[in-house]
Image (cartoon, rainbow, N blue to C red):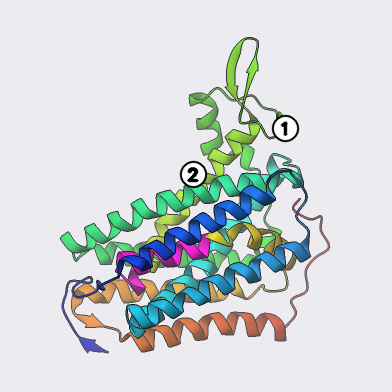
Amino acid sequence: MQFASSNPVAGASYDVPWFMYAALILALVLYACIEAWQGRTDHVVRFNEAVRWSVFYISLAALFAVPIFFYISPAASGQYLAAWAVEKALSLDNLFVFGLIFASFKVEQKYRRRMLNYGIAGAIFFRLIFILLGIELLKRFGWISIIFGIILIRAAWHTFKRAKRGVRNERVDMSNSRSWRLMNKLLPIHPQFDGHKLTTVINGKRMLTLMAAVIILIELTDIVFAVDSVPAVLAISPDPFIAYSSNVFAILGLRSLFFVYDAVAVKFWALNWALAGILVWIGFKMVVTPLGLHVPIALNLVILGLLLLAGVAVSLLWKKKQPDQKAVD
């Protein structure tokens, strides 16, 4: 470690060529075209299909690091990969809650893909706002990094408690949550599905269908999780392009990853312990940065990589016995 500027974003921005922004937009267009083509009819996403698309989007994210390496800088490429990996790991919490939401409202399997795509579109938009806002706050108020760090350490504590009791043993009825009750007070919600329609007419009144309401709940959930994940990414790279592109590529594969995670979450039980460690480390890094203590990029990447690999390795080496229980959905 070495002493550095107390401003956490000082000298953190890169000179990004215009075609890198174009490449990011092209990736978003490609995703939209793929989903529009595949979403012509609602169908149940099978495990093998989800694995294939997860591998595709993970490969696409990894390949994007290559032009970053050559046209921006090697350091930026490393930060992008680290931020992408952390965002991907933190998204496991999102996936678990999405599963609870689908189970609570008895969403049919064939509609889940479409609903997740709506959620992803919203997440891409809101993450841009949160990242730009976070960077602006860090520029204006260097000490805000300490607040972000405390938020991450608090999130680590909740992740630790969930890992200790086992997330698959939790049973939460999201239809009784405060967010859902508030939505029903503020919005005209029809408590039933009407195919994949977002609105329907009941007794001459236009109302949101249950599908639209659940999509809104998913979006609100992602916004809550962004409070944790955006500071974590900004702690790795406060550059707007690196932070946002890493979020985009992590989010693009989220829909496919949901169906994979739903099948293998029990096998990788130790990832929650790894996530708790990652959040503690990043939170510590954000707290000490305004105090003039700078963690070298290489050391940061090594620690993050070791924590993730440890979570996977422990899960594979030590099989955790699970009690017999009904699946969440």
| Position of residue 146 in the picture relative to residue 124 (left or right) | left
Residue at image location 74% in from the left, 76% down from the top: 320
Magenta extent: 234-251
Q: Residues within 10 Å of mark 1 (few under 14, many from 20)?
A: few
Q: Residue type at mark 1: give it.
A: Gly
Q: Earlier in the sequence, mark 2 or mark 1?
A: 1
**Residue 98 forms part of the magenta stretch:** no
Figure check: 110 above or below 78:
above
Q: Name the residue under label 2.
A: 220
Residue 174 shows which numbered tag? none
Q: Where is residue 104 in the image (x, y as percent from the top left)?
A: 69, 42
> Which of the 4 image quadrants contains residue 22?
bottom left
Write the residue at 70% across / 28% down. 192
Residue 154 visible to an observer of this rendering: no
Residue shown at the point (78%, 59%) measured from the top left: 46
Q: Circle 1 is placed at which residue position? A: 195
